[in-house]
Amino acid sequence: MTAAEVAAPSRGRGGASASILSYATLLLIGILAFAIRLFSVIKYESVIHEFDPYFNYRVTQYLSKAGIYEFWNWFDDRTWYPLGRVIGGTVYPGLTLTAGTMWWVANSLNIPLSVETACVFTAPIFSAFAAWSTYALTKEVKGVGAGLTAAALIAMVPSYISRSVAGSYDNEGVAIFALVFTFYLYLKTLNTGSLFYATLNALAYFYMVCSWGGYTFIINLIPMHVLLCIVTGRYSSRLYIAYSPLVILGTLLAALVPVVGFNAVMTSEHFASFLVFVILQVVAIVYYIKRILSPKAFRVAVAVVLTVGAVFALTLIAVLIAMVATSPTKGWSGRSLSLLDPTYASKYIPIIASVSEHQPPTWPSYFMDINILAFLVPAGVIACFLPLSDSSTFVVLYLVTAVYFSGVMVRLMLVLAPAACIMSGIALSEAFATFTLSVKYQIELPDPPAPQVAPVKQTGSGATSETSAATVAADLAKEKSLSEKGKETLRERPKRSRKKEKESAAEKSVAKKVSKRKASKVLPLEASAVGIVLLLLLVSFYVIHCVWAAAEAYSAPSIVLTSHTADGMHVFDDFREAYAWLSHNTEEDDKVASWWDYGYQTTAMANRTVIVDNNTWNNTHIATVGMAMSSPERQAWEIYQTLDVKYVFVIFGGLVGYPSDDINKFLWMVRIGGGVFPHIKEADYLRDGQYRIDGQATPTMLNSLMYKLSYYRFAEATMDGKGYDRVRRTEIGKKVFKLTHFEEVFTTHHWMVRIYKLKPPKNRLRGKNKRKTKPIAKKSKPSSSTKSPGRRS
C-alpha cells in the first residue's frame, strides 16, 4: 500500500481537512528548517563564515551601492595584483542577486535591514524553500505522505546544514533549492505533459546556472533519464515536452550568464544533452510516421529517417570532436575530469587536489552527514520499483549518480543529501503506512461468530429434539419466502434501479479485491506495534543527531574559533584581530601576500590588495607565491619585491594547537610551485620520505621562508623555551635565528597570525668607490719623493 493509495480516500471524505493539515505541516517544516540553522547566531554572533562567503558578501555590498549595471562591468583591482579581475564576468551571480533583491525589497518596505544581515540569513531562508521543493518532488513520485516525510528529513539533514547555517553565505545555500526545484518541474512536466511547466523548468534551470557551477549535473542527469526511457520503450509525448524546451530554452538562457557564455554549447559537459536531443527528435519522427503510414510504408520511412538521423548524428559528433580536439583536456574542465577520474587532480592539477573539500570522503563522514538515511535508502529504492514509473526511475538514477560523485569528492555529499532524503522519505512512508494499516485492519476485524451449541439429547423425553426440528423448518420456510419476495421485487423494479444495483455490485467486488490486497499486506498486531515503536526510535535518533550537528559541529564560524577545557570555553579571535591591524596600520594601497586561502578575507575585512585569492583562476600566480614561501629568505624577498609586496603574513597553530595552519599546508605550496618552476622539488623538503620540522628536517626546509616566518621567536614564547609544536607534537629543529630581509610587525594574541614587513632595499652606489685625496699644489718640477695621486708605489 503506497502513500498515494492511503491519501486517496481522504480526498473523498475529508479532502479539505487533509489539505489544510498538509499545508500546516509544510509550514512547520519550513520553520524547522530555518530555526535549526540559527545556532551559529544564537551561540556566537551574526557574522559571515568561512572564506568564500566573504567574497560573496563583498560583491553584494558593491551591488547594493553601485547598482546592477556597474556590477556587470566591475573591474576589481584589489585582487590578483597586478592582474586584477573582472568580477561581473567571472562570478556566478545568482546568490548575489538573490541577497541583493532581498535587501532591496526589505528597504523598499522601510524595513531597516543591512546587507550583512541579508547575507547571513539567505541560506536559512532558502533551506525552507528546498524542503518545500523536496516535498513537491517526492509527491510526484510516491504521494503526499512520502513528500512530507522527505521534506522533514531534508530540513534537518547535517550534510545540507553544513552549507546553509546562518552566516554560510555560499553558492550552495541557494543552489540546492534550485537543483531540487528544477528536478520537480521536470517530473511535473513529465507527468502532465504541460508546456507551461516545461517553460518553468527552463527558467528554474537558468536560475541554477546563475547560482552554481554544479548545474552541469542537471544537464547531464536529465539526458541520461531521457535516454533510459527511450531505450526501455517508455517514450511518450510527455517525455518530448519535458526535455526539448529544456535543452533549447535552457541553453539559450544559460549562454546569457557571463561566466558561462559560449561554454554552454562548446564544452564537453554539455554535449550529452545535445546528442540525446537529436536522438529524441529521431524517435519522435519515427513514432509520428508510424501513426500516419501503413506498415509497409512505415518500414521504408523508418529506414530513411534512421539513415538521415545517423548521418546527422555522426556529423554532429564530428563537429563536436573537431571543436574540442585542440583542447588538451578535450573540452572538459579540471574539476569535471577529477570527477570522472579521481586520480586526475593529484597527477596534473595539485591546486584542485590541495583543497580539503575535493578529497574523497571516509565512511564515518557518510554517517555524520546523512546518518540513518544511509540504511533507509535501499528500502526506498525497492519501494520505487513497486510499481515502476518514469518519476521513480528518475529518482533512482539521481541517487545512483549522486552516490558515485559523493564518493569521489566530499563536497558533493551535498548533492547526495536530497536524493537520500527522498528515498528515505519513501521508505519511512511506506513502512508507516504498512504498520498503521495492519493495526487498523486488526482492530476493525469483526469478532469470530460464536460456535453453535448442538442440541442436548434428553433420555427422559423427545421434547428438545422436536423443538429444534421445528425451529429449523421455520427458518427454511422464512428464507424461502424472502427469496420469492426478492424475485418478485426484481421483476417489478425498473431498469434504472437494476443498473444501479449492478454498479453497486461492481463497487463491492472492487472493495473485496482491495480488502484482499490489504489482507495480503497485513502483519500481526504485535509485530506492527513493535515496528512502529522501532521506526519512532530510529527517527528520534536522527533528530537528536541532526540537532547536535547543527548546534555543535557546524555552527562555529571558522573565523572565530573556540575550545573547551577544564577552565571553560576559550575564544580565539586572532583572524579578525590581524585583519583589523592591517586595516588600521597599513597604507590603503599596500599589497599583502599570503597563501591563497586567505585572499578573500583579506580583501573583504582588511580592504587591502592581495596577490592571490580563493578564485584560483591563475595557477602560475599561485605557483609564484608558493615558490616564494618555499625559497630561502633572500630569494623570497626578491620575488616579493617584483610583485610590489609590502606585507606578508602566515597562519601558525603550533602554540595553541590549531591544525589548519600554513606549516601543514606547506607541502601543497611546494607541489604547486614545483609544477610551474621545476627547480622546486618536493624531495628536498622531505627526510627519507617524511615531512619533518624537528632536528631531522632537511636544510632546505629549515631555511625556507615559511619555516622562518612561522617559527621566528617561537622558542621564546613556549614555557620551557624548547619550542615544542603542539600540532606536530615535536620540538622544532632550528630554534634561534635572525631575519635579514623581513621584520616582524605584529603577532596576534594566540600567535595564530604573524605579520611581517619587507625591509626596504639597501642604497646602492653607482660606479666604484674612489679614495678621497687632498688637492696638490702645482709645482714646476715635482720632487722625486712625491707620488702621483691614485697610483700605487
Image (tube, rainbow, N blue to C red):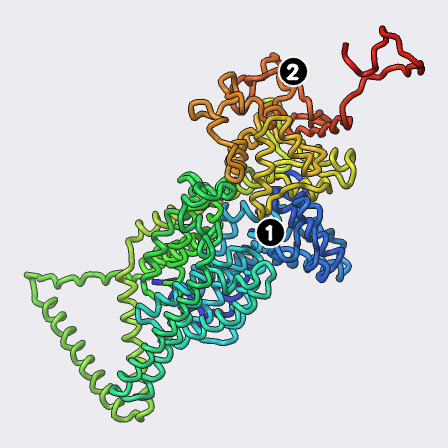
Residue located farthest toward the left when viewing the structure as drawn: 459
Is residue 372 visible to the viewer in this orientation of the structure?
no
Q: Nearer the viewer, residue 441 or 380?
A: 380
Is residue 476 visible to the viewer in this orientation of the structure?
yes
State the quadrant of the N terminus.
bottom left
Determine the secondary structure under disc 2.
helix
Which mark, by number, is residue 124? Answer: 1
Residue at 63% x, 47% y: name it. 53
**Left or right: 354 in relation to 648:** left
Q: Position of residue 623 (x, y in %)?
A: 57, 39
Q: Amino acid at mark 1?
A: Pro
Residue density around tag 2, few if under 14, some if 14–19, many if 20 or more, within 10 Å: some
Nearest-to-viewer mark from 2 and 1: 2
Residue located farthest toward the top when viewing the structure as drawn: 785
Residue density around tag 1, few if under 14, some if 14–19, many if 20 or more, within 10 Å: many
Q: Position of residue 324 (x, y in %)?
A: 45, 60
Q: Is residue 349 above or below residue 692?
A: below
Q: Position of residue 640 (x, y in %)?
A: 66, 34
Q: Amino acid at mark 2?
A: Glu
Determine the secondary structure under disc 1.
helix
Q: Is residue 370 above or below residue 665?
A: below
Q: Position of residue 218 (x, y in %)?
A: 47, 60
State the quadrant of the C terminus.
top right
> Distance of mark 2 from mark 1, alpha carbons?
46 Å
Residue where numbered disc 2 is placed: 716
Q: Nearer the viewer, residue 100 or 66?
A: 66
Residue at 57% x, 43% y: name it. 620
Which mark, by number, is residue 329? Answer: none
Earlier in the chain: of badge 2 and badge 1, it is 1
